[in-house]
Image (cartoon, grey):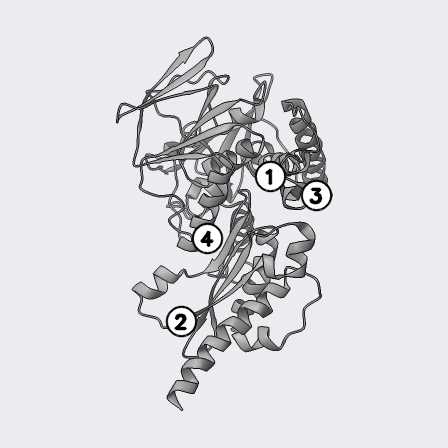
Amino acid sequence: MGGVSLHTGTVPSKTLREAVLYLTGLTQRDLYGQSYRLKEDITVADLTARTQHVVGREMDVVRNQLSRNRVAMFPGTGRFVDDHTVAVTDATGQEELLTARHIVIATGTRPARPASVEFDERTIMDSDGVLNMERVPRSMVIVGAGVIGIEYASMFAALGSKVTVVEQREGMLDFCDVEIVEALKYRLRDLAVTFRFGETVAAVERHARGALAVLESGKKIPADAVMYSAGRQGLTDGLDLGKAGLTADRRGRIAVDEHYRTAVSHIYAVGDVIGFPALAATSMEQGRSAAYHACEEPVNPIHHLQPIGIYSIPEISFIGRTEDQLTDEKVPFEVGVSRYRELARGQIVGDAHGMLKLLVSSEDRRLLGVHCFGTGATELIHIGQAVMGCGGTVDYLVDAVFNYPTFAESYKVAALDATNKMREIDHLRD
């Protein structure tokens, strides 16, 4: 109940991150010294205790919400019999046929596994297997510098593991602001993370004392564990889609229209199984929109402004366009920056590295993008989302009064920075 997000994805990985931050005392070291730790010898049991507690509670919440809304639940594995009928096989092997006017496919994804790699869930694993590790590895190779790979790289580096990230592309998180990504790379290198960009893992050798990752360039990297983060595969191969008149692409994804209808108009698909953006928050909205449309209820389309959150250490979050995108589109803009070290709240919590960046239109002063790096970034971004969603300008942030001391105050500081720069240009023209 709750799918990948609750059991192997969003909730357990973010809970694990909180446990890592708490037990390592990482965020307090600027205040209490680099040797500060809340617990010296952190075990996997220390980390998973909190995860199991949160997952259990969330499962109860989901089950209770479904029950009180009179949603009938049929535990089991489903497959299509025809375009209106699903066969559900329960744990005892008993099969039951369910017929419905509308069907929604929300089966999610699983980690993609290269066929050439022998996964054993102990030494060589995917992002699901990480949650079941027997011990914290002293060294680790992470293959893939996408969102999931970087999130786990930062967690294990915080725990003291010597992490090497191997990525065949020349960079990472290329959809993010370049300056923000550089700040994250600097912080991860400070935690002894090594990046191997433009490299491909040719083979992984298992040995009694660990694994050896062999790169195509000839480099060999020894490690206690190797984690593959090579994208996701849609969970559609067991659905018998053909019997419903549907197909999936090679990554198991199903194509949908703006109402989340598949090629068969009374069958909908939502969430990660339809591909980008494959975020828990977006998936829930897609499900809501599909349900409204199926029941012929009016519903507004999902707003085009959607925040992106990356739970690395420190966090990254942004909304709107990046500097590179605006430059390519020849949209004139000004940049306003606020640094956590200049905020009282930043000093209080010990985050001297965080920053908030506003991209402001030089023509009409509207916000074009907000990019944040540091403590609370994924929460902080929603202020920018609200202002942008209402068509607000930088002047609103200049004139607004924020609680003090807060990280939210960074919006006012960055807004003043941007407007001061624009004022300089205006003065030159006078």
Q: Nearer the viewer, residue 303 or 23?
A: 23
- Mark 4 burial class by Cα count in 10 Å: few <14, some 14-19, many 20+: many
> In the rendered structure, are the residues bearing label 4 and label 3 in contact, judged by CB atoms less than 8 Å apart?
no
Task: Report x, y in % for residue 227.
Answer: 45, 26
Look at label 1 and name its amino acid: Lys
Q: Nearer the viewer, residue 189 or 382?
A: 189
Distance (Cα) linking label 4 and label 2: 18 Å
Mark 2 vs mark 1: in front: 2
Which residue is label 1 attached to? 14
Task: Report x, y in % for residue 2.
Answer: 61, 37
- Mark 1 burial class by Cα count in 10 Å: few <14, some 14-19, many 20+: some
- Mark 2 burial class by Cα count in 10 Å: few <14, some 14-19, many 20+: many
Mark 4 or mark 3: which comes first in sequence?
3
Give residue 187's mark. none
Which residue is label 2 attached to? 333
User: Element at badge 3?
Assistant: helix
> In the rendered structure, are the residues bearing label 2 and label 1 in contact, judged by CB atoms less than 8 Å apart?
no
User: Element at badge 4?
Assistant: helix
Mark 1 or mark 3: which comes first in sequence?
1
Look at label 2 and name its amino acid: Phe
User: Element at badge 2?
Assistant: strand
Look at label 4 and name its amino acid: Ile
User: Element at badge 1?
Assistant: helix
Which residue is label 3 attached to? 65
Q: Which of 295 and 113 is in front in this view?
A: 113
For the point 58% across and 18% down, the residue is 134
Give residue 180's mark. 4
Look at label 3 and name its amino acid: Gln
